[in-house]
Amino acid sequence: MVDPLANPRAAIAKPGDRDPVHVTLPPALLRLFPKAEPEVTLAAGTISELVDRLDARWPGMRDRLVDSRPAIRQHINVFVEGRRARLDAQLSPGAKVFIITAVSGG
Amino acid sequence: MAETVLVLIGTKKGAFVMKSDATRRNWALQGPYCETWPIHHMIGDASTGAIYAGGGNEWFGPAVWRSGDLGANWTHSSEGLSYGEGEAPINAVWSLARRNGRLYAGVEPAGLFVSGDAGASWQPISGLREHPSREHWQPGGGGLILHSLVPHPDDDNQIWVGISTAGVFYSADGGETWTPRNKGTRCDFLPEEQRYPEFGQCVHCLVMAPGMPRRLYQQNHCGMYRSDDGGQSWVSIEEGLPSSFGFPAATHPRDAGTLFLIPLNGDIKGRYVPDGKAAVWRTRDAGRSWQALREGLPQENAFIGVLRQAMATDPLEPAGVYFGTSSGALFASADAGDSWSCIAEHLPAISSVETMVLDG
């Protein structure tokens, strides 16, 4: 069975779909997925769904953002409307989501 | 036919490739690759020209990278590199090996995976993690890492691995069941009466002699060893060496009695080459006697270390030998270690060195 949300064209909101949210991806992630766009609008009700939608567009992206526990990777931060969110966080229609790489390294 | 020699260099900040012809006199550096990820191990498949690089990134987790065009373009995947929900996530890939169309990956925390599609997806070889000793394995300085992967050259069912600090393990059934292979190797860090346990040894590097699959060598945290029975028993070969401590070991491409080691000054003395004088030590009689090879290597104020996967040989005649330092220098010998030159400096800290020789 085809998941309509796995189709990028279906990510634009339609009646019955999840509501669209706006996502900003970090530059370091974009370098791993050269075809990815820095700002994306897609339909998702939770952060986990959002990551699944990103993975459907750019296969492998979920593994880069989420570990096998499953949880958002330790040094990745996801902010929703300015507040840090977990994988199961609910998303309001039109929410602004920022995926950010933590400041780390040497 | 003209040959191209590639030295594959994994570093703390990306992968690099050095390229030369069969004379191995002039080298060109390419990279950094893999988006400057920490790359713990990098290997080549001379039959296809593919390069694989295993590592882990603090932000994005573990991956095996692949280039089919000698580094111009890369893909990455960690599909299937997981112990499953609720288990500790895998942080990084530490070792790679290929045999008969299969690609193996050793990871941290210690475990083994195999890919039948050139690294695009991975399946666990779960028997190793199910070994009853697993709950007692302790992480070393680099974590609980499976760093040495030694598949049998002719029998797909036989494989040896080295885990820090669990020791050497062997499987004769494709990885379903495993037995420790540490008899005769010491744990100087344990109380005196417990220094020869069944497992828990801090193996640093495990290699197989060419054309002689039952002969293994290992550099251990506590000594250098040879086994002539597939690891069922080990004998010390450290007499004649300046210390019992070091990380890498590399075999000659054709001579089962020749081994290269780089002893360091000890685990609590800085882990430099002894007296600040760099030397690769070579045996040609399976460890009964040793020769220090110093020509062309720095002999004054050289406070360098070499990590466990950072030495390799090439298959040419005479064999090339290469090692990379934690301070980012790459040394090469085109005469089996008799003389050396520095062919790259100012690289990031070097984690691994391997070679690939291509026709044309």
Image (cartoon, coloured by chain):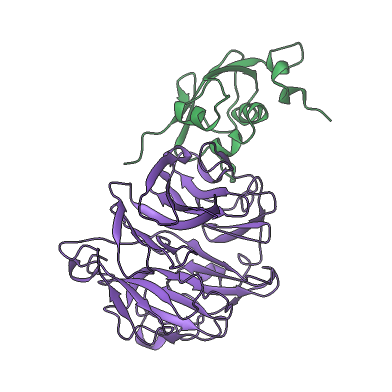
**Which one is nearer the viewer's eye here, B318 or B151?**
B318
Residue at 38% across, 61% down: B322
Residue at 28% across, 76% down: B292
Quadrant hosting residue B68: top right
Placement of the N terminus of chain B among the 4 image quadrants: bottom right
* Residue B125 percent location from the top left of the image: 66, 61
The residue sitting at the front extreme is: B1
- Vertical placement of A28 versus B252: above or below? above
Identify the chain drawn in purple: B
- Vertical placement of B236 versus B117: above or below? below
B289 displayed left or right of B185: left
* Residue B330 percent location from the top left of the image: 33, 55
* Residue B154 percent location from the top left of the image: 67, 71
Quadrant hosting residue A65: top right
- Vertical placement of B108 versus A54: above or below? below
A10 displayed left or right of B83: right
Residue at 31% across, 57% down: B325
A60 displayed left or right of B272: right
